Amino acid sequence: MLDFVQLEQDLDQEERMIRDTAREFVEEHVKPDVGDHFEAGTFPKELIPKMGELGFYAPNLEGYGSPNVSETAYGLLMQELEAGDSGLRSMASVQGALVMYPIHAYGSEEQKEEWLPAMGQGEAIGCFGLTEPEHGSNPSAMETRAERDGDGYVLNGSKTWITNSPIADVAIVWARDRSAEDDPVRGFLVETDRDGVSTNKITEKLSLRASITGEIGLNDVYVPEANVLPGVSGMKGPLSCLTQARYGIAWGAVGAARDCFEEARQYAIDREQFGGPIGRFQLQQQKLAEMATQITLAQLLAYRLAELKERGDMRPQHVSMAKRNNVRMAREQSKVAREMLGGNGITTDYSPMRHMANMETVYTYEGTHDIHTLVLGEELTGLKAYQ
Ligand code: FAD
């Protein structure tokens, strides 16, 4: 596997073990069928508890069954899962970074005990409802609202593009709390079997097909006060979760690109044209050289991000740069790998075009490439361009 500047030499034993466990899992349980799942538009649901058993959901959290592994170990896990498919990494990101993380950071003791061990084991599935039909890049304009009703709240509104909503047991729904001054955004744990909740599947996707995506309809849904995340109010709640998930994406995208590279390199060695392997042609070697260089640069950024995160110095702007760069890199390099495979490259027998299609989603969700550009622009100039 490509590790050109030997970053993996510095891994400790636990990090190596997690990398190897995830790599073997992907080889054995994901790669053989993922092309079929992509074609069928299905997620291999039977892997959900298995991934829990192996500790793939938020192992970087502490307590409630989570082992508190290093941020590098967590990053390596995301890298290996996305080398399988972005749908798989999305499953782990949503469950771990977007649902378990906010419960861990902002939940009550009862909420933590009820959900964290079950989610860690993959016995319960969570989803994260922020995006709305009319509010994607600007979620603070959300219309979903919570009104006080006796000891609880009544929720109304709709969310869309929600990973796993049709198979989730619980959704973290971000909504404006109309009972408080300035309508702050609050997080509500909404069990999907509550009256008034609907979770239609979105079926027309041409990207991230091996992942279930849906809507969340909320029609006079009552939730008790005990279902509100008590520890956070305002956009800091959802945005802090997104920082966690984007960290995983910055690593994961490298895995997708690396898988494309490995597939293209092998193909260049095996495929013969004009009396010998296509890998002997300088044009093909140039493509591999560029791909390996870009992947290595992205890896360096991911490893540095892990160091900053580990010591508590990682800022959202650091994550914006890494998510933006590494996903763009994977999007561009998957295309190059695809072209190196000729006609075979457009099939699901090989991974590059699947990764290439997936990257359109990864480029768009968790803050589009444009929005991360504007975040960096603000950081560099002090002037905000997206209001
Ligand atoms: P828009 O915000 O309408 O953007 C359209 C275009 O305009 C983009 O190119 C954008 O970059 C550009 N644009 C917008 N504002 C500006 C600006 N100020 N300056 C310049 N350009 C701008 N959301 C969740 O809450 N939970 C999930 O689990 C989840 N999973 C997803 C899974 C999939 C498969 C997909 C596709 C999306 C998912 N999303 C999820 C939603 C995702 O986060 C949004 O699609 C994303 O934030 C972009 O919002 P939008 O699609 O409404 O695009």
Image (cartoon, helix red, strand yellow):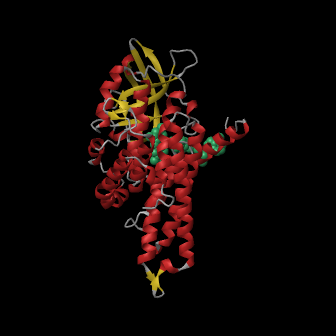
> Would you say residue 171 is visible in this rendering?
yes
Residue 251 percent coordinates (x, y): 48, 49
For ligand 1, the image quadrant comes to top right
Viewer-nearest residue: 188 or 19:
19
- Classify 289 as above or below 317: below
Furthest-top residue in this view = 150
Quadrant assignment for the C terminus: top right
Q: Residue sitting at 48 percent across and 46 percent down?
A: 249
Residue under the image location 72 percent in, 35 percent down: 382
- Residue 160 visible in the snapshot: no
| Tally of numbered tags | 0
Tell me residue 300's x, y (percent).
54, 52
x 58%, y 48%: residue = 324
Place of residue 327 in the rendered image (x, y in percent of width and height, measured from the top left): 53, 52
Q: Quadrant of residue 194?
A: top left
* Front residue of this view, candidates 385 and 192: 385
The answer to which of 267 and 137 lies nearer the viewer is 267
Q: Residue furthest bottom?
A: 275
User: In the image, is residue 240 above or below residue 332?
Assistant: above
Q: Is residue 63 left or right of residue 156?
A: left
- For image coordinates 33% across by 37% down, the residue present is 125
- Taking depth in this image into account, of 37 and 15 the one nearest to the observer is 15
